[in-house]
Amino acid sequence: MIQAVDRALRILTVLQGGRRMSLGEIATAIDLAPSTVHGLVRTLLAHGMVGQELDSGRYRLGPATLRLGNVYLDTLELRSRVAIWTEGLARRTGCAVRTGVLLFDEVVVVAHEPRPDGTRQMPEVGIVIPAHASALGKALLAFGPEREAAELRSMTGETVTDAAVLAGQLAQTRTTGIATEVEEAVLGECAVAATVFDSSDEATGAIGLVVPAARWPLPSDAVDALRDTARAVSRELGAPVWPPRRYH
């Protein structure tokens, strides 16, 4: 067990249920020195997991915990919806299929359908990829709220790290509904992804085809199959049109 993680989770646990507590009360509740709790709380504050009231100085759960909860709930429904579609998509295209959701500036893979060629492949559920360096991430960023400019970390020599170039790619994705990535996250790997929308026209996830660089670019019929799958899953989640009219 990692001690710092354990202590941070204990802090979040004592704050659940709408509790508002002082630093000393938190320290007493989890039986730690206030000086130790102070450092942990400041870190949780920086990530939005804990909030501090201006008038009383007391601490409570922060907005990031709600976002984590929403991601979890979205993930449950999204995974159940894509399960009946992604196996067929893998067969039609011969590609591995990933389904991902956005968590802050990264994409978490929540479902993975291996290539149907019988080769041994590592399970990918749970892997995390920087959003700007992945087709899944770009498909979600394109239809999400505007974000403050942040440093774009380089994963390979092909990673887009220029904010203006990324903005241009996202604009194109809003037009086509399709995002691409060529060896930006992993050398030798390319991907194309399409956004999945829910009944409120919000981007709830993305589905992507992943292939070795030797198979890139994918033929148009594979991209059409991906688009059809994203449209079908979105329809099952209640989206009336794909992509939503406000992005047309």
Image (cartoon, helix red, strand yellow):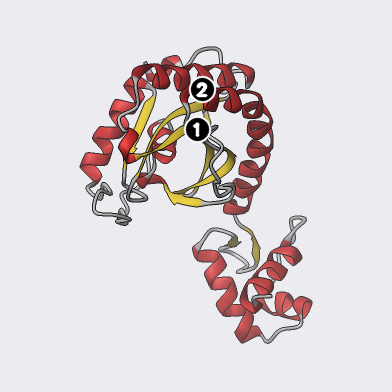
- Name the side, left or right, on which 44 lies relative to 28: left
**Residue 166 location in percent, x, y?**
27, 40
Q: Quadrant of residue 48?
A: bottom right
Asked if disc 1 and disc 2 are in contact, CB closer than 8 Å, the reply is yes
**Residue 234 location in percent, x, y?**
56, 21
Query: Upstream in the sequence, badge 1 or badge 2?
Result: 1
- Name the side, left or right, on which 101 lies relative to 168: right
Disc 1: which residue: 206
Q: Is residue 78 above or below residue 163?
A: above
Q: What label does residue 55 carry, if any?
A: none
Q: Amino acid at mark 2?
A: Ala
Quarter the N terminus occupies: bottom right
Label 1, label 2: how many angstroms apart (C-alpha)?
8 Å
Residue at position x 30%, y 53% in the image = 152
Residue at position x 62%, y 28% in the image = 82
Q: What label does residue 230 carry, if any?
A: 2
Q: Label 1 neighbourhood size at 10 Å, few (<14), some (14-19), many (20+)?
A: many
